[in-house]
Image: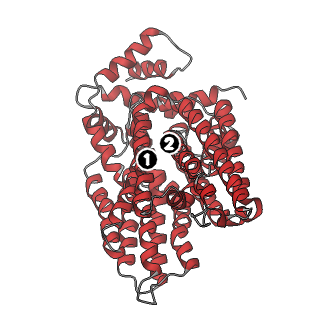
Amino acid sequence: MIEIQNESRRLLDTEDEDTGVRSEQDAYLDKVKNGKLFLASLAAVLGPLSFGFVLGYSSPAIPELSTIADPRLRLDDDEASWFGSIVTIGAAIGGLLGGWMVDKIGRKLSLMFCSLPYIFGFTIVIAAQNVWMLYLGRVLTGLASGVTSLVVPLYISEIAHERVRGTMGSCVQLMVVTGIMGAYIAGMFLDWRWLAICCSIPPTMMMVFMCFMPETPRFLLSQGKRREAEEAVRFLRGPDAPAEWECARIEDASDDQGGSLGMADLKNPGVYKPLGVGIMLMLFQQLTGINAIMFYAETIFEEAHFKNSNVATVVVAAIQVVFTAVAALVMDRAGRKLLLILSGVSMCLSTAAFGVYFKLSSETHGNSSGLCLVESPLAEDPAAGLSWLALASMGFFITGFSLGWGPIPWLVMSEIFPSRVKGFASSVCVLTNWGSAFIITKTFQDLMDLLTSAGTFWLFSGCCALNIVFTILFVPETKGKTLEQIQTQFKGTPE
């Protein structure tokens, strides 16, 4: 055992670029069989698929609930706004709850338990007799979404090895956008109650499938369960990979990291640096303007003469799915940092072009007010002639977001924190993401009134420029590194 631990200590040394050390690590990975790892990841990403159905549910459901015959369930404009946005409040709470759960009961049980509020929430929506029952169902599904957005990236990052961790981690966002598209497509054929029944299927499947999947080796070792950890490694890596070697490597890093979280740890660069990076990644993700673009998507398609808005929303979702899948395929080749920079440049240019579109439209219509710009009559040819600019900008933006700032913040969050602070730090990041999403969504109209449409999108463009600078200066490249090497990199970075 001592010899194994000494060998693992050599492998964890990020400063050592000795070819023999690297080849021995590669030799271990060459023995790995990925079949059951992919199976465990597939079971876990049913959570993000459920999360996507939650986000996508409101788009087809709100128009139907706004015109429903039953006055107890009919939503006015304000109630419809809350029906769509109250999910983010539940998700923010779920992020805090998930941070506590992953440390207390583990990653696997947290995933299994978070399927319950999904199922209960959609059941309440199905059985709703008034608006408050609709709200309660949405809060519960939002709570489950918050837990999911924290636990699934952690689970996948801890079971995946460095050769496939980027691809596996990117599948989280891929399944979210797939769920959104699935809800849009199903909403074209099902009423709101049957759609809710359809949305409850993925979390039910997740709860069943996760029963047969292992807990992560890192969590088991943190609980002193060495034998169970080795069994989990054998399940995930196949019978040919030496499970004892990987467990020894993880244990050695855990010994170096120390025990539980204390206030003094916040002065440790191995804690506060990744925490700062994680928080800013989540904040910048929301400041890209993604919610504003999606808000305008239907109107932009209408101005481009796509009369069927349902088809238009499916097209937008399909673009997200395709390019998030591309990101997943190239993540472990191109690296996180390069994709974040390219994504930021794409969004910076496209939001600036959006601002130009709104500015030119306002001059054409002789009106500089906010929302009425894009709702003005389409019969005016000069404005209609600008629709190509809005359509191209939206496509360019969604492509860029899906390639980088959509999946990567969640992936990097799952990679950079030491084991003892993962629950706390991840919950802070998830709370930042969902809290800022709620604030931006609810204040977006006020921002439009204050700055006009053009000014608002130029502000988003400026935020995208800042996220490029932030990525270049502060975000580390995690491609091809073990979780332990990434954490050692933060501790070894000059302050």
Q: Position of residue 1 (x, y in %)?
A: 37, 24
Placement of the C terminus among the 4 image quadrants: top right
Indicate the amino acid at tag 1. Answer: Ile
Q: Position of residue 72 (x, y in %)?
A: 45, 89
Indicate the amino acid at tag 2. Answer: Thr
The answer to whether 492 is drawn above or below residue 113 in the figure is above
Q: Position of residue 438 (x, y in %)?
A: 61, 63
Is mark 1 in CB contact (under 8 Å) with mark 2? yes
Q: What residue is rendered at 37% in x and 28% in y?
A: 246
User: At numbered mark 2, what does the secondary structure look like: helix, strand or loop?
Assistant: helix
Q: Answer with left or right where residue 468 lies relative to residue 330.
A: right
User: At numbered mark 1, what does the secondary structure look like: helix, strand or loop?
Assistant: helix
**Residue 399 has which mark?**
2
**Residue 319 has which mark?**
1
The answer to whether 414 is drawn above or below residue 46 in the figure is above
| Alpha-carbon span between mark 1 and mark 2 | 7 Å
Q: What residue is rendered at 44% in x and 13% in y?
A: 21
Q: Answer with left or right where residue 431 lies relative to residue 305.
A: right
* Residue that protrudes farthest toward the bottom in the picture: 71
